[in-house]
Image: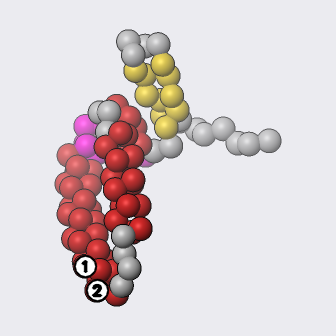
């Protein structure tokens, strides 16, 4: 038997017609703001880039580009959490 979450998060869309449980605050925000298709695109884009790596030089270039992107995204997440935590404390508990 699986244990139920204490306070599960749900996203309501399509004028209340669709209700979907989400795993955490960032998945909630992604669903609520309609960002899932963009993340799916990024995932496919990264898969394509990785498939094009055929030597160490291109691997180094891809790694440096991904590192810079991740660093940038971490800054955005950190700033977003600082703004959202006071406004929506129940999401981050």
Using the image as rendered, state which of residue 63 and residue 76 is in the foreground.
Answer: 63
Tell me, yes or no, if residue 77 can be seen here.
yes
For the view shown, which residue lies furthest in the bottom direction?
Answer: 56
User: What range is drawn magenta here?
Assistant: 84-93
Q: Determine whether, in the image, residue 78 is placed left or right of residue 20.
A: left
Q: Where does residue 79 sit, x and y in percent of width and height?
A: 19, 54
Using the image as rendered, state which of residue 30 and residue 54 is in the foreground.
Answer: 54
**Residue 22 vertical position relative to residue 81 in the rendered view, above or below:** above
User: Residue at the spot x=41%, y=68% of the render?
Assistant: 51
Q: How is the image coloured?
A: secondary structure
Indicate whether residue 71 is drawn in magenta. no
Q: Where does residue 72 sit, x and y in percent of width and height?
A: 20, 63
Residue identifier under label 2: 57
Rendered-image quadrant of the N terminus: top right
Separation of marks 1 and 2 at Cα, in angstroms? 6 Å
For the view shown, which residue lies furthest in the right direction?
Answer: 1
Indicate whether residue 89 is drawn in magenta. yes
By secondary structure, the bulk of the magenta-drawn segment is best described as helix
Q: Where does residue 52 sit, x and y in percent of width and height?
A: 36, 70
Residue identifier under label 1: 61
Image quadrant where residue 50 sits: bottom left
**Are dots 1 and 2 in contact, CB under 8 Å?**
yes
User: Residue at the spot x=35%, y=39% of the render?
Assistant: 37
User: Residue at the spot x=66%, y=38% of the render?
Assistant: 4
Q: Secondary structure at mark 1?
A: helix
Image quadrant where residue 36 sits: top left
Using the image as rendered, state which of residue 88 and residue 29 is in the foreground.
Answer: 29
Q: Secondary structure at mark 2?
A: helix
Task: Report crowding for label 2: few under 14, some 14 to 19, many 20 or more residues within 10 A (C-alpha).
Answer: few
Task: Report crowding for label 1: few under 14, some 14 to 19, many 20 or more residues within 10 A (C-alpha).
Answer: few
């Amino acid at each position: 038997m699986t244990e139920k979450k204490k306070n599960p998060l749900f996203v309501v869309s399509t004028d209340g017609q669709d209700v979907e449980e989400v795993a955490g605050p960032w998945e909630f925000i992604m669903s609520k703001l309609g960002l899932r298709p963009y993340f799916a695109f990024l995932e496919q884009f990264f898969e394509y880039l990785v498939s094009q790596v055929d030597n160490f030089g291109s691997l180094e270039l891809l790694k440096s580009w991904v590192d810079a992107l991740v660093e940038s995204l971490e800054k955005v997440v950190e700033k977003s959490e600082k703004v959202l935590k006071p406004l929506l404390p129940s999401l981050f508990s």
